[in-house]
């Protein structure tokens, strides 16, 4: 008898706890919203956005030979689902420049005298250059090129030329993996990691540190002193910048000496871009902290930013493999642009001219976030 | 209620009659709620002004407006001759504000906390000032202890030390002695009087009547409105209340019965005695007549508490808005 009443009593008390927890949970709208939004966001990202077999990759066709065969190859490549021919150029080296800038993922170069060599059975070379900074993005597509070309030419190699179509391929498809010829994954991930580590620490640390002052009641004291909001911001940001710079050094040294990642661009440009990204992330963290009511909320918000930063920025999965809407969304993340900058500078030897667009976008983001942060963070308590 | 004084010239003088806090019509609303409603406050240099009122009456909000932490929605004023709205930076440099909640950094040591505030205020001879403050506090031997580990009374002393480090001309204290033992309270008030004797003006909010009596003057606010201001004698006289003090067997148990009688504003037991207050002495005497044979009633002076409770009951709560 006493046992049952003991158990009943325990349930009564547990019930009281559950009731209280549910009430508190329902009162914290931020957490409830996050709990509902998180699975939806993950479903969207993993279910629709991420694709390990990217299709419709942008390609440039450099045609140095105007013949029916070139047109047939053009048509065949357009017909494969893997490629989207976004530019047809004819000046030698122009395809290379598009690849360097990151405007296209592939360049197919049809050499001069392609038709003549083909007809004479000399197996002309068809040069396929891929941007292999992200090896995962190019693998399947490259495999598709050879078949597409062979079947395209089979249509045209008829009549007296039919003999060229049979047997071994009539053309010699030469693959060239630019910037990462051996397709080493770490050459892609280690520079990308720089962006992820900095996003994590810079955004989260700042968001937490400001809300902590508010939560512990020290902010009121700070604001009652002659400290101005801008001074509080700078004072909080500088120590984190130093932490960030140490992280940058560690990753860059490891990249160079442990992973042997090539570093082909100018170092000052790299450091400048990194600094810009760090300050942008700190400003974002500061902005979040002016919205969050508690450290817990600040943590949740940072997490909500980090999730797409890791998954959609091109760090973990090929950027070009995502559908249009996801790519547009990811363009709004500072991490996306910084990852492009890091890979561009380290692997592709970007100069300031190549980097200008992404640097400009980051600077614009910094201007917006900085303005929002300073405006929202007032020198009054309410 | 006092009429608003004319605007003061900008340069504060050492003259004791010169107000250093001079604000009029201060109003602050949060959402649809008027938390502070047209409050006037004038405090002269070197005075200790007690700021009293029930919980949620707007004391903290008023203090925050005076030290530049909040911008009033309406009202004007000068603090040390600086405009309350436009010169908040200058005010912040010359005012020390001690928050209700302990607001120092609990993960810094006592000395580090003081050093931080010395730096923020750009003080010279930092080391010397911090050492001096530690000495005065009696914390020199514990300078390296974390501030968060201190007991309530010590935290309060440290907080006071931190906000007078820059020699402010005005000290604003928000319920500084809540939860502090009587001895620490006594020492705290001795310190406040020393600071005031050296010319510092103090505005201190409190719930304790004995603390109110240690002030040179008091201001009573309820539901966001200033209900009484002046010396304690002024406030008591100004209330228009008279009191009878009854002593005798069971006097303290008659409060609720007597309070029902016409002409009685309130009746409250004080130990074994009973305070009966009302606006008219003859009516009071008539009201207590049924018990006059057992209990000796003599004419007394209403206590400050009697006056405050009377004022509070008289003021309707205009701050409560009905939610749609």
Image: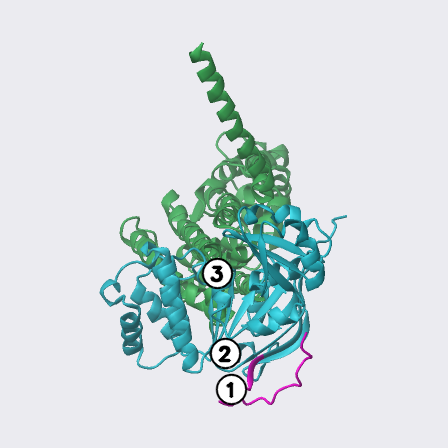
Q: Is residue A56 visible?
A: no
Q: Is residue B10 magenta?
A: yes
Q: Is residue B143 visible?
A: yes
Foreground mark, 1 or 3, reads: 1
Which quadrant does the N terminus of chain B fall into? bottom right
Residue sitting at x 35%, y 61%: B183
Residue A136 horizontal/vertical position (percent) = 46, 40
SS state under label 2: loop
Quarter of the rendering containing residue A159:
top right
Residue holding disc 3: B100
| Residue B56 image label | none
Chain depicted in cyan:
B
Residue A212 left/right relative to A250: right
**Span colored in magenta:** B1-21
Residue B294 horizontal/vertical position (percent) = 58, 49
Residue holding disc 2: B47
């Amino acid at each position: 008898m006493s046992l049952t009443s003991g158990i009943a009593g325990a349930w009564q008390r547990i019930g009281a706890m559950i009731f209280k927890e549910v009430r508190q949970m329902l009162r914290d709208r931020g957490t409830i919203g996050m709990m509902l939004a998180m699975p939806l966001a993950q479903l969207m990202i993993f279910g629709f956005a991420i694709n390990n077999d990217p299709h419709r990759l942008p390609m440039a066709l450099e045609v140095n030979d105007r013949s029916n065969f070139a047109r047939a190859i053009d048509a065949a490549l357009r017909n494969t689902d893997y490629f989207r021919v976004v530019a047809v150029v004819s000046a030698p080296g122009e395809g290379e420049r598009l690849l360097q800038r990151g405007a296209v993922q592939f360049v197919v170069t049809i050499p001069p005298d392609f038709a003549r060599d083909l007809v004479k059975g000399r197996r002309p070379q068809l040069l396929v250059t891929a941007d292999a900074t992200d090896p995962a993005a190019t693998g399947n597509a490259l495999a598709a090129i050879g078949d597409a070309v062979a079947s395209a030419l089979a249509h045209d190699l008829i009549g007296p030329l039919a003999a060229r179509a049979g047997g071994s391929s009539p053309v010699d498809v030469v693959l060239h993996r630019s910037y990462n010829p051996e397709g080493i994954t770490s050459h892609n991930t280690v520079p990308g990691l720089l962006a992820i580590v900095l996003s994590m620490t810079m955004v989260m640390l700042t968001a937490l540190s400001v809300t902590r002052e508010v939560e512990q009641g020290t902010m009121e004291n700070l604001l009652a002193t002659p400290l101005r909001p801008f001074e509080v911001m700078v004072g909080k940001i500088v120590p984190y910048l130093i932490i960030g710079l140490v992280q940058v050094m560690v990753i860059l040294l490891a990249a160079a000496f442990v992973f042997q990642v090539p570093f082909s661009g100018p170092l000052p440009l790299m450091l400048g871009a990194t600094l810009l990204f760090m300050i942008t992330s700190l400003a974002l963290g500061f902005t979040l902290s002016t919205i969050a009511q508690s450290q817990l909320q600040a943590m949740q918000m940072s997490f909500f930013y980090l999730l797409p930063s890791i998954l959609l920025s091109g760090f973990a999965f090929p950027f070009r493999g995502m559908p249009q809407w996801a790519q547009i969304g990811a363009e709004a993340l500072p991490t996306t642009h910084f990852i492009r900058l890091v890979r561009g500078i380290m692997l592709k030897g970007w100069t300031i001219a190549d980097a200008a667009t992404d640097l400009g976008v980051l600077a614009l983001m910094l201007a917006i976030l900085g303005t929002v942060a300073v405006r929202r963070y007032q020198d009054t308590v309410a | 209620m006092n009429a608003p004084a004319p605007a003061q010239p900008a340069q504060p003088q050492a003259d004791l009659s010169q107000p250093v806090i001079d604000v009029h019509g201060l109003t602050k609303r949060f959402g649809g709620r008027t938390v502070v409603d047209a409050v006037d406050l004038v405090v002269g240099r070197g005075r200790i002004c007690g700021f009293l009122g029930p919980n949620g009456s707007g004391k903290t909000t008023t203090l925050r407006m005076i030290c530049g932490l909040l911008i009033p929605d309406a009202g004007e004023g000068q603090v040390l001759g600086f405009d309350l709205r436009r010169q908040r930076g200058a005010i912040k440099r010359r005012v020390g504000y001690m928050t209700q909640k302990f607001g120092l950094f609990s993960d810094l040591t006592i000395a580090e906390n003081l050093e931080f505030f010395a730096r923020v205020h750009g003080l010279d001879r930092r080391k010397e000032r911090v050492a001096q403050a530690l000495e005065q506090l009696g914390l020199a031997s514990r300078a390296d202890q974390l501030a968060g580990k201190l007991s309530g009374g010590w935290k309060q002393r440290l907080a006071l030390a931190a906000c007078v480090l820059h020699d402010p001309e005005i000290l604003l204290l928000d319920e500084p002695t809540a939860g502090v033992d009587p001895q620490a309270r006594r020492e705290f008030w001795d310190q406040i009087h020393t600071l005031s004797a050296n010319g510092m003006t103090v505005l201190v909010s409190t719930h304790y009547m004995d603390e109110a009596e240690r002030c040179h003057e008091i201001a009573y606010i309820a539901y966001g409105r200033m209900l009484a201001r002046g010396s304690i004698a002024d406030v008591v006289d100004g209330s228009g209340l008279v009191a009878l003090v009854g002593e005798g067997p069971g006097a303290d148990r008659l409060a609720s019965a007597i309070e029902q009688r016409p002409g009685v504003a309130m009746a409250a037991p004080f130990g074994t005695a009973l305070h009966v207050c009302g606006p008219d002495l003859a009516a009071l005497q008539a009201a207590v007549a049924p018990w006059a044979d057992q209990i000796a009633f003599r004419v007394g002076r209403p206590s400050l508490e009697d006056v405050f409770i009377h004022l509070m009951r008289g003021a309707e709560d205009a701050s409560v808005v009905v939610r749609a």
